[in-house]
Image: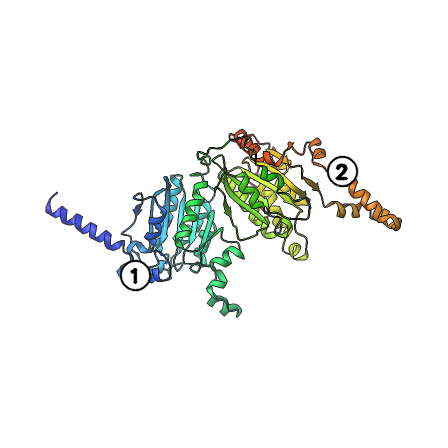
């Protein structure tokens, strides 16, 4: 190499080193003082060592407004590129708050959009670390900012997309992460809203701070916008890697199967004692899921919101599955508005990425009450039915105890292309509970003979209960089998093996052609 070329190479090395420092040491220190990692530190934690390849390191703002073209803005405030996460190709976007506050100008947005398009083109996941001030006001051109949202909607369900809110993500820029498949918020640093506290106060007079309005706690516990909560940046990145480990590379691939050694005929006798004798007593469905899944494989979806239903990713003999269980410890396992929304979105996620669905049913139905009816429980409940009807992945139901009322439909019903329907002997079914049903049926007779009303009611309840045993239901072909609880994992393993090559194209559909149903959303 000649001396001139050597000088050019050294100049390139120095320039790259300087540009990788982002906004400089002072701003990096401020980032650290807030308990936050820098854009590149986040990518270093995400990607396998030495695999990250960066694109667009020398991009600058292209606007001369307010002298932005004269500002030293490495990468225009965002780092993009690809690498490997646990050995699998992944693209990533990481906003750099130390450069122009991570605001989204034209070139900044173009870099994000290119990453989104390249990830889709190569059929691999894309991860977004959001830490910026929204649209860059000085540039006043938001076509490419808006395109970020359009691509988020376009890629969702095609490639796994994950957003992590690691700082501010406000206004129109909030729509891109909410349209991704999975969103994580970070405690004390996430701020995720359309209208901030100052705007709210000026319009409504209501006073609220950032954390109360849209912090990580709010997004996980109240709004349900987020799917996971993290204590810090490091834990958030752990969640990203954990979530992606359950996902295929894209919707055209099968879920990954990890080697797992176990006796497929192993019986789990702890399950025999998990259902209380008293039908009014609750139990923790997490214990059932942990016993059925491979050891240490359970990862919960939205664990802090709508806790009357539990949704989990897990593995059974190394194969990714989705468990959905009614949590009898919260609202007796009833479906309410929030639980319906949580259920429907999780089913959509499973269906998009070819993940088998296992429901563990124990629900007394939809939550009664004026607030629920006025809030649109019928409309929200309809989302669950639509999601189940549309889903073509392997679907297995195990009825642990109650399967009462309209909530029996989304949890698993033959009309929704259920592949396997299993009952435990503790099964209890009905349009409503026996006492309430018999009071309606016997109302006229009990009025005519009030002296013997209770006796008639007790007799009717007994007759009603005798008619709805699991054996009677099996006799009508509503169930495929009644199994001992200790056999459940063994049956799931065999069912998943049988359903591994299920062909959605062979599922019966109406002859009439249409684009899609009108969603109750």
Mark 2, residue position: 466
Name the secondary structure under disc 1.
helix
> Which residue is pictured at 30% across the width and 49% down the height?
56
Quarter-of-image position of residue 515: top right
Quarter-of-image position of residue 424: top right
Residue 521 appears in view: no
Coordinates of residue 147 in the picture (x, y in percent): 41, 50
Is 453 on the left-hand or right-hand side of 16? right
How crowded is the residue under tag 1: few (<14 C-alpha within 10 Å), some, or many (20+)? some
Whichever of labels 1 and 2 marks the residue nearer the N terminus, that label is: 1
**35 or 69: which is nearer to us?**
35
Foreground label between 1 and 2: 2
Q: Quadrant of the N terminus?
A: top left
Of the numbered discs in the image, which one, if any, rests on residue 68? Answer: 1
Name the secondary structure under disc 2.
helix
**489 or 83: which is nearer to us?**
489
Coordinates of residue 356 in the picture (x, y in percent): 53, 37
State the separation of the CA atoms marked 1 and 2.
Answer: 79 Å
């Amino acid at each position: 190499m000649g001396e001139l070329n050597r000088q050019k190479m050294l100049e390139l090395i120095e320039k790259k080193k300087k540009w990788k420092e982002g906004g400089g040491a002072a701003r990096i220190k401020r980032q650290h003082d807030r308990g936050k990692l820098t854009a590149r530190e986040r990518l270093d934690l995400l990607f396998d060592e030495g695999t990250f390849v960066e694109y667009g390191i020398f991009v600058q703002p292209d606007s001369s407004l307010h002298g932005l073209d004269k500002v030293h803005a490495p990468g225009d405030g965002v780092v993009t590129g690809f690498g490997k996460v646990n050995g699998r190709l992944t693209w990533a976007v990481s906003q750099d708050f130390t450069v122009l506050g991570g605001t989204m100008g034209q070139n900044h947005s173009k870099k994000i959009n290119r990453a989104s398009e390249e990830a889709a083109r190569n059929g691999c996941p894309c991860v977004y670390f959001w830490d910026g001030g929204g649209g860059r006001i000085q540039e006043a051109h938001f076509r490419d900012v808006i395109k970020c949202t359009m691509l988020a909607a376009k890629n969702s369900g095609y490639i796994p997309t994950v957003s992590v809110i690691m700082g501010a993500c406000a206004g129109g820029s909030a729509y891109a992460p909410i349209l991704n498949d999975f969103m994580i918020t970070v405690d004390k640093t996430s701020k995720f809203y359309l209208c901030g506290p100052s705007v709210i106060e000026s319009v409504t007079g209501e006073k609220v701070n950032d954390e109360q309005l849209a912090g990580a706690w709010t997004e996980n516990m109240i709004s349900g916008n987020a799917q996971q909560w993290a204590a810090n940046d490091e834990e958030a990145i752990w969640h990203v890697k954990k979530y992606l480990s359950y996902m295929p590379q894209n919707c055209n691939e099968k879920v990954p199967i990890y080697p797992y050694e176990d006796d497929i005929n192993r019986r789990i006798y702890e399950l025999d004692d998990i259902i209380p004798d008293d039908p009014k007593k609750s139990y923790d469905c997490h214990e059932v899921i942990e016993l059925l899944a491979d050891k240490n494989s359970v990862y919960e979806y939205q664990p802090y919101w709508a806790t009357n239903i539990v949704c989990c990713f897990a593995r059974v003999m190394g194969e990714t599955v989705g468990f959905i269980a009614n949590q009898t410890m919260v609202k007796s396992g009833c479906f309410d508005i929030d639980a319906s929304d949580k259920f429907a979105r999780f089913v959509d996620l499973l269906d998009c990425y070819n993940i088998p669905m296992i429901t563990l049913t124990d629900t007394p139905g939809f939550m009664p009450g004026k607030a629920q009816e006025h809030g649109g429980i019928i409309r929200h409940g309809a989302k669950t039915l639509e999601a189940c009807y549309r889903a073509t992945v392997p679907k297995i139901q195990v009825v642990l105890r109650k399967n009462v009322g309209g909530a029996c439909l989304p949890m698993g019903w033959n009309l929704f292309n259920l592949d396997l329907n299993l009952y435990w002997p503790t099964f209890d079914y009905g349009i409503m509970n026996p006492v309430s049903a018999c009071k309606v049926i016997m109302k006229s007779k009990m009025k005519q003979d009030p002296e013997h009303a209770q006796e008639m009611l007790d007799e009717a309840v007994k007759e009603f209960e005798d008619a709805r045993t699991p054996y009677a239901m099996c006799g009508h072909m509503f169930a495929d089998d009644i199994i001992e609880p200790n056999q459940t994992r063994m049956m799931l393993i065999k069912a998943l093996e049988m359903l591994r090559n299920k062909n959605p194209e062979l599922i019966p559909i109406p002859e009439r052609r249409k684009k899609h149903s009108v969603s109750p959303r």
